[in-house]
């Protein structure tokens, strides 16, 4: 199955496409492999969130310096 194309508006249909895609990817995996698959996704997402938070904090600090 090909990776789903997600609309810019991110609709309910997009969520259904993603769920179906992940189901097809993982349906024949043993439990340990499926758990590793989802844990890797969580690690990537947490890295993404930490990077966004770091950038936001940097921007806030820069704005404070400009106001001083």
Image: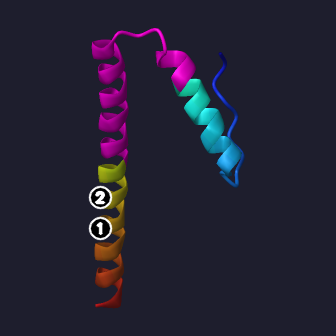
Looking at the rendering, which quadrant does residue 67 occupy? bottom left
Q: Relative to 40, is 51 above or below?
A: below
Query: Left or right of 35: which side holds 6?
Result: right
**Tag 2: Cα neighbours inside 10 Å, few (<14), some, or many (≥20)?**
few
Query: Left or right of 10: which side holds 22?
Result: left
Q: Which residues are magenta?
A: 23-48
As for residue 8 lying within the magenta part, the answer is no
Question: Which quadrant is home to the N terminus?
Answer: top right
User: Could you say whether the residue bearing mark 2 is in a helix, strand or loop?
Assistant: helix
Q: Position of residue 54 (x, y in %)?
A: 29, 58
Residue 58 or residue 16, whichever sits in front: 16
**Tag 1: Cα neighbours inside 10 Å, few (<14), some, or many (≥20)?**
few
As for residue 37 lying within the magenta part, the answer is yes
Q: Are marks 2 and 1 in contact (CB under 8 Å)?
A: yes
Residue 66 or residue 52, whichever sits in front: 52
Tell me the residue that label 2 is attached to: 54
Tell me the residue that label 1 is attached to: 57
């Amino acid at each position: 199955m090909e990776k789903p194309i997600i609309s810019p508006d991110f609709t309910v249909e997009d969520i259904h496409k993603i769920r179906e895609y992940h189901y097809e990817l993982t349906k024949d995996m043993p439990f340990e492999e499926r758990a590793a698959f989802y844990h890797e996704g969580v690690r990537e997402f947490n890295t993404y969130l930490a990077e966004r938070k770091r950038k936001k904090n940097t921007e806030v600090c820069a704005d404070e310096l400009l106001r001083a």
